[in-house]
Amino acid sequence: MTDTPGPDEAAPAEQIGLGAPEAAAPASAHPRNARSWAHKVDRLQPDLREGVRGTNVAGRRLAGPVQGFGKMWQKTYRMNAGPGIAPAEAISIWRKHFSEFWPAGNRFSTPITNITPGDVALLDLRIGGGVKLSTGVFVLYADAESFTLMTPQGHLFAGWITFSAARDGEDTIVQAQALFRAGDPLYELAMPIMHRREDQFWLATLTALGERLGAADPEVEISRTCVDSRRQWRYARNIWHNSAIRSLLQAAADRRKRGNKSGTGQGGTGKDDKS
Amino acid sequence: MSAPAVTMDVRRLGHGVPVIDIKGDVTAACEPVLMSAYEAAGGGKAPWLLLNFGGLDYMNSGGIGMLVTLLVRAKRQRQHLAAYGLSEHYREIFELTRLDEAIAIYDSEQAALSAAR
């Protein structure tokens, strides 16, 4: 890998023999969508919330497609919501009721009821075998016609997903578009299964959303493009943060703790872990 | 769909380093404009490609995604991308999305050019 000088190491203009500098005037300090973006964060610090386990998020950095391990994919799920609803209205409903359209068994908990830039949502995702993967997402961007969620370290995917709506002729097209890599080598091995599960997840979600928006018979189109077929081996160590492994270990530790308590008569409930 | 409100002009600096001057709104709808500009800048032939955001009015998350796909194309050709002219706000967005780990950010055209030479 070639090292390139960073901004602080660049030689001044005089040293490199430039003539009259063609300085770039920085763009407007306050662009019109400045409030649509989250403020910069180095590490996520969510509050604990009822209804989700809330592990594997605190202290994690965000991880975009640049920081992932596996092949880079762009997946698009599109649904025609018909002419009866404006794009902004469709997005407003989706933002306010985001988790209500999810398939049963998965949980999404935000600090407030709407999706707002800078929020950290905590997730419990059903991954099969009775196991739930605890992770989160960060609300990177939200405006009247779109919003974007970005993943933290340890999530199945390193990337973001943008939900948007736009007019196409008379109709409003609602779309979820993800740009991501598998977060680490283990997730990459599981990608054939994860693709299938993700497709089922968003198919069910968009169908439920379409019904709520008044579409007569919502049909979801799915397209998948491999944007980069190379794996990024320098990010193989992301596996240290793998939320699936950690969720399994956390569930086992919880069960052991409950077993010890009930064995010593210290008030264990004996109930299964519902988180 | 309306036409994207953006222009992307290509020029060459010293030693033939290409620069794309981005003016207007950068959204996912700009992808054909950006890819045309990329080809006009020689595709992956130059070892460095500079992106001048001095005329950027607006960028949404779709625009950031489009830059990631440009980055993939450039990396395939072992080409470095550098950006300058970013306002403080958009510099923070590059840092937030960790795009700055793959696209080097410079304070000025001179600084970017000196890295590229």
Image (tube, coloured by chain):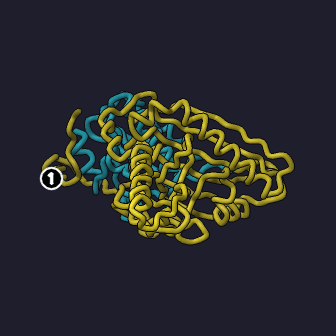
Chain colours: A yellow, B cyan
Residue placed farthest to the bottom in the image?
A112
Check disc 1: other Cα within 10 Å, few if <14, some if 14-19, many if 20+: few
Q: Quadrant of the N terminus of chain A?
A: top left
Rendered residue at 52%/54% (across/down): B61
In this rendered view, identify the residue nearer to me: A19 or A27: A27
- Vertical comparison of A50 with A87: above or below: below
One can see residue B72 in this view: yes
Rendered residue at 64%/44% (across/down): A201
Residue beneath label 1, please? A14
Kindly state the secondary structure of the residue where label 1 is placed: helix
Q: Position of residue A238 (x, y in %)?
A: 34, 42
Q: Give the side of residue A263 with respect to residue A78, left or right.
A: left
Task: Give the letter of the chain under mark 1.
Answer: A
In this rendered view, identify the residue nearer to me: A264 or A217: A264
Q: Give the side of residue A164 with respect to residue B107, left or right.
A: right
- Vertical comparison of A202 with A42: above or below: above
Q: Quadrant of residue B113?
A: top left
Q: Position of residue A163 (x, y in %)?
A: 61, 53
Rendered residue at 39%/47% (across/down): A249
Q: Give the side of residue A246 with respect to residue A213, left or right.
A: left
Q: Position of residue A63 (x, y in %)?
A: 40, 49
One can see residue B21 in this view: no
Rendered residue at 39%/38% (across/down): A184
Q: Position of residue A153 (x, y in %)?
A: 39, 50
In this rendered view, identify the residue nearer to me: A248 or A9: A248
Q: Quadrant of residue B72?
A: top left
Q: Amino acid at mark 1?
A: Glu
Residue placed farthest to the left in the image?
A15
Residue placed farthest to the right in the image?
A216
In this rendered view, identify the residue nearer to me: B90 or A115: A115
Q: Give the side of residue A39 with respect to residue A224, left or right.
A: left
